[in-house]
Amino acid sequence: MEKEQIVAFWNWFETQKDEPYDALIASVNERIKQLSLGLSVELDVTQTPKVLVVTPQGVKHYFTHAHEVVAYALPIEDWELIATKPPLGMLEVVEVDGISIEPSEVTFMPLNSPEHPDDLAIRLYHKAYVAQEGREQNAVIAGLYLLLDKLLGEESATFDFQYIDFDDMPHPKEQDYPLMQLPAFMAHKKSTRKIAGEKFPKEDIGLLEGKVEALPTLLVVNNGLKYYEFTKSFPYLLRITLALHNTGDNGLPNGNTDELYGLEDVFYQGISKVQKGHFIATETYDKKREMFYYVDSLESIENVLAKVPETLSSCTLSYEISYDPFWVMVESYIYM
């Protein structure tokens, strides 16, 4: 999204903010789609100041858009502007497609996996849930997610869980707990993780080999950033692409690779070693090597790019910078 477009949106809202609620909510939601199809707006005009929430409706790829829209907002008198739905102190009955869900009737059970002991996974129970797929099941699940949004806030409900399951009632040997105890359970689970509170956890580098369309692919992945909680401190994704000049029929580097390793070292030393960001992964496939880093600032990226040799014989270097404070674009590497 362009900053000028976002500023124009808020200038327009300034002229419309005193319209009746029904007309205002309809026009604002129509207008914000011109910035991003994934965004919606919720209004609360019953309190002072009035509240406008820009929400991606739980879709991960649009959270960045919500934050960008609010970041470029101009101060609007008597209005509070918020990116993503915040947690609420009290829960009320939610209704979806004619099905009402009372929060006091919702319970949860922690799910534990020996293979992934740090995963945050739960099963939610409500008597209206049905096992058969269809309208009724979809309505109950949507209602339970709405309750999670209200209890935890939209960002936590979307990003904190690795798995959520649903059922109508616990089995006899299952221990469930009231929904209102979920925040305390989550806080305890997070605090006991190996990297809890560590802004620069120890790297855990793994090598993976595979094939894509009959060509081999090599992955070097930092497994030490699973469950990482400081993504907003390193919001810029630097994606470096090396178009390889000398490769074999398999698309992998052929001959002397000293220059390639030297380039990798420039980025690693200039970002990870000086704690300006985190190494995520390197992927080599089909005459191309890509490196992924999350970095704290554009200045840090400029500094490391300035150290790249002007002339390269083994490859052609290009790069892209994306603003991705939730690290959505590299989930497939972090959680593989």
Image: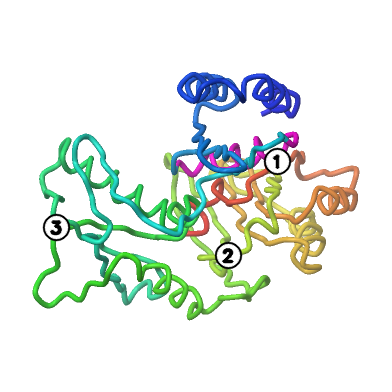
Magenta residue span: 59-75
Relative height, residue 143 to residue 88 (above, below): above
Quarter of the image where one finds residue 281 = bottom right
Q: Is residue 142 left or right of residue 336?
A: left
In this rendering, which labeled residue sits more in front, label 1 or label 2?
1
Q: Distance between the residues labelled 3 and 1?
A: 41 Å
The amino acid marked with disc number 3 is Asp
- Specify which label sits upstream in the sequence, 3 or 1: 1
Relative height, residue 196 to residue 108 (above, below): below
Relative height, residue 77 to residue 120 (above, below): above
Q: Mark 1 points at which residue?
A: 71
Q: Distance between the residues labelled 1 and 2?
A: 21 Å
Q: Where residue 314 appears, x then y in whole percent?
A: 77, 45
Q: Name the residue under label 3.
A: 168
Q: Name the residue under label 2.
A: 229
- Specify which label sits upstream in the sequence, 1 or 2: 1
